[in-house]
Amino acid sequence: MTASRPKRALITGITGQDGAWLARLLLDKGYIVHGVKRRSSSFNTGRIDDLYQDPHLDSVRLFLHYGDLTDATNLIRIVQETQPDEIYNLAAQSHVHVSFETPEYTANADAVGTLRLLEAIRILGMSETVRFYQASTSELYGKAQETPQNERTPFYPRSPYAVAKLYAFWTTVNYREAYGMHASNGILFNHEGPTRGETFVTRKITRAVAAIELGLQDVLYLGNIDARRDWGHARDYAEGMWRIVQQDEPDDYVLATGETHSVREFVELAFAEVGRHIAWKGEGADETGVDAVNGKVLVRIDPRYFRPTEVDVLLGDPSKAHQKLGWRHTTQFPELVAEMVAADLKTVAREASRIGRHD
Ligand code: NDP
Ligand code: GDR
């Protein structure tokens, strides 16, 4: 990076978990960061409020633009106005279960939205100057054809979300091959942290553990607790995204920890953080997780959280990222769980005191 002209990045999905981590990382590296945020009837910038700078200051380096991946003209205008060196396409309807309820919207935002952004770059004649990162996902492996999964493992998507992301993956590859774009896919396995969306299973669990501990909730309802995921920390994955974009040649990379754990294990570890040992009783939809000391039911199964088609086991092989990017995850699974529970004990207590439920 030259001293006279800082690099410019455009992040779609800047208000999401990963967008916020990436914005922080790029600002720390001296970038000027432009982010696309959606118009919302309530505040949706909570994850980046601490990065916000008064736009009237000369020193400002973070800029937000209203936009949506379903609106091509708006994407063209934003790319033209911001003239980015790097575009990180993180925006998506990212909830797998919700994608079964909103399949068409998910395809529009996640699949065609990626195409719109790539076309904006092409239409503006920026194919050879912009570097493009696509937020691809381990959900592409779905009904996994081999374990562990690497960059050569065949895809078998199992949800409207994963099918939409498959389209985006191959569109990114096609624009790289057809137009010589520096366009790369990060095939990221699940990554979490204290700012993870509240309806993903890890955060749902850590919030519930905190609320139960604080006497604000009795039971945590979950779906398939035997699903297994390769869970890392989102901060590490933001670093990996940046490294992918810095490579001389565009390419596709798996980012993962190389460990897999069940939802059940996550529940056990999270409750252990507040000193509770979970014993499992019963089977299938009647299974419960009880406090091993006093027998109180803390976890129940609710079939409404089952998915029409499930991804049973994901385990990534990040060897290529280790070798070519020098990237490795730094936060281990137990530390991730501990950090999330500790953060939610504070967050849930604060929320409760704000609405007067804690006196
Ligand atoms: P989040 O759900 O936390 O964030 C998604 C972001 O996309 C939010 O900023 C959201 O805005 C925005 N968004 C949603 N729909 C649109 C739209 N139509 N137009 C513009 N913006 C939109 O996801 P994560 O941060 O966890 O994930 C980032 C990306 O990485 C996603 O594409 C996800 O599919 C993918 N991914 C995530 C993994 C993970 O484990 N976290 C693993 C692999 C891939 P708003 O805040 O207003 O809702
Ligand atoms: P996932 O994450 O589908 O892997 O997608 P999620 O946390 O939603 O589910 C993980 C597993 O837990 C099981 N599960 C539950 N899930 C939720 N949300 N709620 C529950 O109550 C529950 N009970 C059990 C699920 O069935 C599943 O097997 C995430 C998203 O971030 C995607 O955008 C991203 O692409 C992938 O990770 C990699």
Image (cartoon, rainbow, N blue to C red):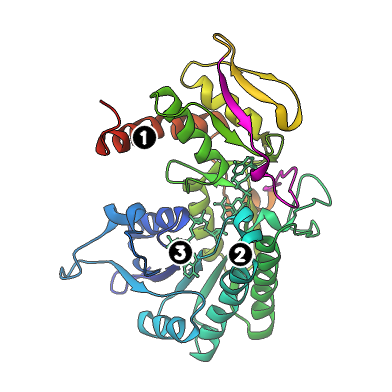
Image quadrant where residue 314 sits: top right
Q: Is residue 317 above or below residue 130?
A: above
Reading the image, the residue beneath label 3 is 13
| Residue 186 located left or right of residue 43 | right
Query: Which element carries disc 3, helix, strand or loop?
Result: loop
Residue occupying image coordinates x 63% and y 71%: 104
Dot 3 beta carbon under 8 Å from ligand 1 = yes
Q: Quadrant of the C terminus?
A: top left
Query: Which element carries disc 2, helix, strand or loop?
Result: loop
Alpha carbon of mark 1 to alpha carbon of mark 3: how far? 25 Å
Circles 3 and 2, Cβ within 8 Å, touching? The answer is no
| Residue 339 located left or right of residue 24 | right
Reading the image, the residue beneath label 2 is 102
Alpha carbon of mark 1 to alpha carbon of mark 2: how far? 30 Å
Which numbered mark, 1 or 2, is in the foreground of this view?
2
Q: If you read the primary sequence from the N terminus, does the residue marked by circle 1 or circle 2 appear first?
A: 2
Q: Which residues are magenta?
A: 296-318
Q: Which residue is at the front of the view, 146 or 99?
A: 99
Mark linked to residue 120: none
Image quadrant where residue 231 sits: top right
Which numbered mark, 3 or 2, is in the foreground of this view?
2
Q: If you read the primary sequence from the N terminus, does the residue marked by circle 3 or circle 2 appear first?
A: 3
Alpha carbon of mark 3 to alpha carbon of mark 2: how far? 19 Å
Which numbered mark, 1 or 3, is in the foreground of this view?
1
Reading the image, the residue beneath label 1 is 348
